[in-house]
Structures are given as C-alpha cells and as structure tokens.
C-alpha cells in the first residue's frame, strides 16, 4: 500500500497528524521534520512509495515553500500546512498545483486536512468523466482533477459521453458542459437519468454565468449540482468532493439497511427485495435458479458448551466462508444460524455438488475461537423447482433441509431426495 508523507517541523503537530492518520485512515506514513529529511526519504523510497504528501510551508531549511515545490516536482499530490492566511500565497500555491492549503489554527483544520487525505485515497478508485467540447476548457478541468487523483475519462459531447459510459459503466461522477454539438448537457442528463439514479452516477452541470437560469434547469433535469464558469479551483474541488461524500453516505446508509449487522451478509429484507426480481427473471425462463436453505447443526450446543460469544465467532466464520465460496451468488443470513443462497444458472446437480464441497470443507476445518478449536457441520436443502414466488421456493428448500436434519444432519438434500 502506498504511504502518506508528512513533512512538518513541529513535533507536536507532526505527532497529532500521525496519530490521527493512523486512527482514522489506517494508511502507513513516513514523516520528515525538514526539507533535507524529506529529500532523503524520497531518494531512498522513490516518490512512487507515496500517494500524497502533507507539507509544512515553512521549514527551518526551506522557509519559502521549497518543500512544496519539491513534492510537486515529484508528482506527489500535496496538501500544504501553513501558519497564516495570505491571499497572494494562496493564489501562488493553487497555481503551483497543490491539492489544497490548510491553516494550522484549530482542531477543525486538522480534521479537514485528514478528510482531504481520505478523499484523495478514495479518489484513486473513482472513475470521473469530463464532457466538454472546448479542448482548452476540457484540459483545464482534467489537469485540475488529476491533482485529486481521479481516474479521468473525457468526451467532447453528449453522444461520445454515452459511448464512454457504455465502455465504463462504473463511472461514478460526470461533469458536463451545457452547450455542445450533437447532444447538449440537458439532453445528456435526461438520457442518463433513465439509466442511472443520482446515487449511482452523480452529475455536475458546468456552464457559463451568461444565463442564470441554467443552474436551476440543470438540477431540474436531474443533475446533482451545478458549477458556474469561470470557477476557482477550490469551488470545483468542493463541489466534486461534496457530491461524492453525499453519494457515498447514501451508499453506506443503504448498505447498512441491507446487511446483517454481525456477519455483514445481506439480511432477510434485502434477500426478498432483490430476490423477487431474480426469481421473476428465472420464472420467465431467463436462467435457472437454485434456492438453498442452510442451517448449522446443533448450534445451540456450541452456545451452551462454549458461550454465546464463541457462537458469534462461529457465525461470522461461516458467513465469511460462504462469501468466499459462493462469490457469484446472493448469500443472506435469514436469522439465527439460518442462511439462504440464491444461485442462478445452476441446476440441482451442480448446486448440490458445490454445496457438498462447501459442507465437507466446513466439517473438516476447525474454527479457532477464543483459543479453542470448534468443529461444526451444516445441513442444506436445495431446490431448482421454480415455484410461484421466491417465498414458496424457499419454503420447499426448507422442507428439504428439514428432511436432511431428520436423516442425520451434515448432508445436502435436493429435489430428488424429496419425500413430500
Ligand atoms: N451466538 C449466537 N447464537 C444465536 C444467534 N441467533 C440465534 N442463536 C442461537 O442459535 C440456536 C439455535 O438452536 P436450535 O434452533 O435449537 O437449533 P440447533 O441447536 O442448531 O439444532 P438443529 O438445527 O436441529 O441442528 C439457539 O440456541 C439460539 O439462541 C446469534 O446471533 N448468536
């Protein structure tokens, strides 16, 4: 993992930063207290060892910001720490291409600097599309956004933007101009909103201030936000970052509502919401669907013999194994020690073979919990019989599971084993 380089001569500030980075970001850091030490570190490790630098503007051996110029010359996105605000300095720093500057005057500023680092770290994995017909304006925006480490794609009009999105459907944020040939910004937003909602793909409309109604119209067409041209660097960053923070928060909230808190598997609610569509598609003949009901054997004994806490460790372990062994399936915890798996494009035979492999693996590998080896088995019912609803198909899988339990547990029963 790439590290963060902190260059700061005050040991108090340096220690605060290192501690907060460690606590909130858990990203490894190197630190230097002077320009000389910074140079040594970059020479020794190479600038590629770092994804960003946090640089004090005034160091004892670099009083005029030379350390900032040095990190920027080594292509390191740099956040500048400064003791006081000065408009000329601010403009100079932004023109040099720093990510941002932070005045060291309160705890809030340190928190802000850390949140910037966090944002930069996340940005490395975010695909961003700039749609702008003017080559000059496009490169200007791209250059600014590159400093924030995004994976950047470009298009010169709405039509090209749609084709880029076709190739890269996981683009998370799009900035679009209004006036463009072939397809303008409004048409592009309208077309995209039929496919992606505001939290799947964020859109920021960008256009000149000549027409003040553009901002409202962009938003009404479905954009998340709007930015007037000409803009200052910081406004672009603030709008992009805020929009991303917002959609990430929505995603986290949705994820929390759909996941079982302890095992982090999907919960019953999500299974039935998503599963209804999966089942409906299977019913229409789009693919086959195997519904699996799984239950850990004699789980009460695990709790009674070892403790509820150990029982929880076992549940998390099983959930983890399920996630790893069935990566393409929807795996959910229905409650207690009951799980459900929806496998598409899988017939009874294939599903049973996969489940038997999993069953054997589970039975043969002890789970280490509180320094003790816990051995467990599980039983499974699986049905390929597409019933009226997901609920009734799961009911059938439950009945097969019940028979597997009755016949001795630690086994997989499918439709061919049904005695009902
Ligand atoms: N540790 C832990 N135990 C749970 C949790 N939810 C349910 N249980 C326990 O799971 C056990 C389920 O026991 P039973 O329904 O009797 O089933 P079993 O002992 O697994 O027996 P069979 O299913 O017949 O093999 C009960 O003791 C519940 O208290 C949980 O979140 N954590």
Image (cartoon, helix red, strand yellow):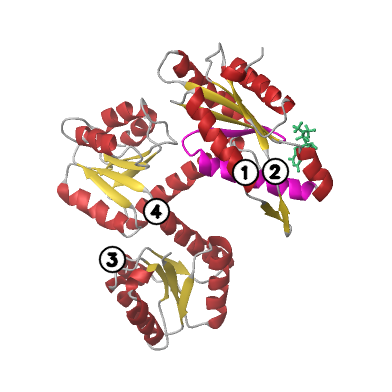
> Circle 3 is placed at which residue position?
95
- Mark found first going from the N terminus, 4 or 3: 3
Task: Tell me where residue 335 appears, x and y as whole percent.
Answer: 70, 33
Marks 4 and 3 sit apart, C-alpha to C-alpha, by: 21 Å
> Circle 1 is placed at which residue position?
362
- Mark found first going from the N terminus, 1 or 4: 4
Residue 337 is a magenta residue: no
Q: Nearer the viewer, mark 4 or mark 2?
A: 2
Q: Main secondary structure of the magenta part?
A: helix
> Circle 4 is placed at which residue position?
123
Marks 1 and 4 sit apart, C-alpha to C-alpha, by: 38 Å
Up the image or down, 192 lies above or below 286; here it is below
222 vs 75, left or right, is: right
Residue plotted at (56% across, 77% down) = 15
Q: Nearer the viewer, mark 1 or mark 4?
A: 1
Tell me if residue 235 can be seen.
yes
Counting other residues with Cα less than 10 Å from the Cα at mark 3, is it few (<14), some (14-19), or many (20 or more)?
few
Q: Is mark 4 within 8 Å of ligand 1?
A: no
Q: Which residues are magenta?
A: 308-336
- Quarter of the image with the N terminus is bottom left
- Mark found first going from the N terminus, 3 or 2: 3
In the structure shown, which secondary structural element does the residue marked by tag 1 occupy?
A: helix
Counting other residues with Cα less than 10 Å from the Cα at mark 4, is it few (<14), some (14-19), or many (20 or more)?
some
In the structure shown, which secondary structural element does the residue marked by tag 3 occupy?
A: helix
């Amino acid at each position: 993992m790439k590290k963060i380089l902190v260059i700061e001569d005050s040991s108090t500030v340096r220690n605060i930063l290192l501690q907060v980075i460690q606590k909130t970001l858990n990203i490894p850091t190197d630190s230097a207290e002077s320009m000389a030490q910074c140079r040594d570190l970059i020479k020794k490790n190479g600038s590629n060892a770092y994804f960003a630098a946090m640089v004090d503007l005034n160091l004892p051996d670099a009083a005029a910001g030379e350390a900032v110029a040095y990190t920027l010359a080594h292509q390191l996105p740099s956040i500048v720490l400064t003791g006081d605000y000065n408009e000329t300095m601010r403009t100079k720093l932004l023109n040099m291409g720093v990510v941002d500057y932070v005045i060291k005057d309160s705890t809030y500023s340190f928190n802000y600097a850390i949140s910037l680092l966090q944002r930069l770290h996340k940005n490395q994995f975010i695909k961003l599309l700039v749609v702008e017909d003017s080559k000059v304006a496009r490169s200007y925006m791209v250059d600014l956004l590159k400093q924030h480490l995004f994976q950047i794609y470009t298009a010169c009009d709405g039509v090209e933007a749609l084709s880029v999105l076709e190739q890269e459907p996981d683009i998370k944020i799009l900035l679009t101009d209004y006036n463009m040939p072939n397809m303008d910004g409004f048409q592009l937003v309208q077309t995209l909103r039929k496919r992606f909602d505001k939290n799947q793909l964020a859109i920021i409309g960008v256009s000149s201030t000549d027409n003040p109604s553009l901002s409202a119209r962009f938003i009404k067409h479905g954009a998340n936000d709007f930015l007037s041209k000409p803009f200052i660097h910081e406004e672009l960053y603030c709008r992009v970052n805020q929009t991303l923070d917002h959609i990430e928060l929505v995603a986290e909230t949705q994820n929390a509502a759909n996941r079982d808190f302890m095992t982090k598997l999907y919960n019953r609610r999500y299974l039935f919401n998503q599963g209804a569509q999966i089942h409906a598609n299977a019913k229409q003949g789009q693919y086959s669907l195997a519904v699996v009901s799984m239950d850990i054997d004699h789980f009460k004994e695990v709790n009674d013999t070892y403790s509820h806490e150990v029982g929880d460790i076992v549940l998390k372990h099983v959930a983890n194994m399920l996630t790893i062994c069935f990566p393409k399936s929807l795996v959910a915890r229905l409650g207690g020690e009951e799980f459900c798996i929806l496998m598409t494009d899988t017939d009874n035979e294939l599903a049973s073979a996969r489940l038997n492999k999993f069953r054997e693996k589970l039975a043969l590998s002890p789970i280490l919990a509180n320094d003790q080896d816990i051995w467990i088995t599980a039983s499974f019912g699986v049905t390929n019989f597409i019933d009226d609803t997901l609920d009734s198909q799961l009911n059938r899988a439950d009945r097969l599971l019940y028979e597997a339990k009755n016949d001795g547990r630690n086994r997989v029963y499918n439709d061919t084993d049904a005695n009902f």
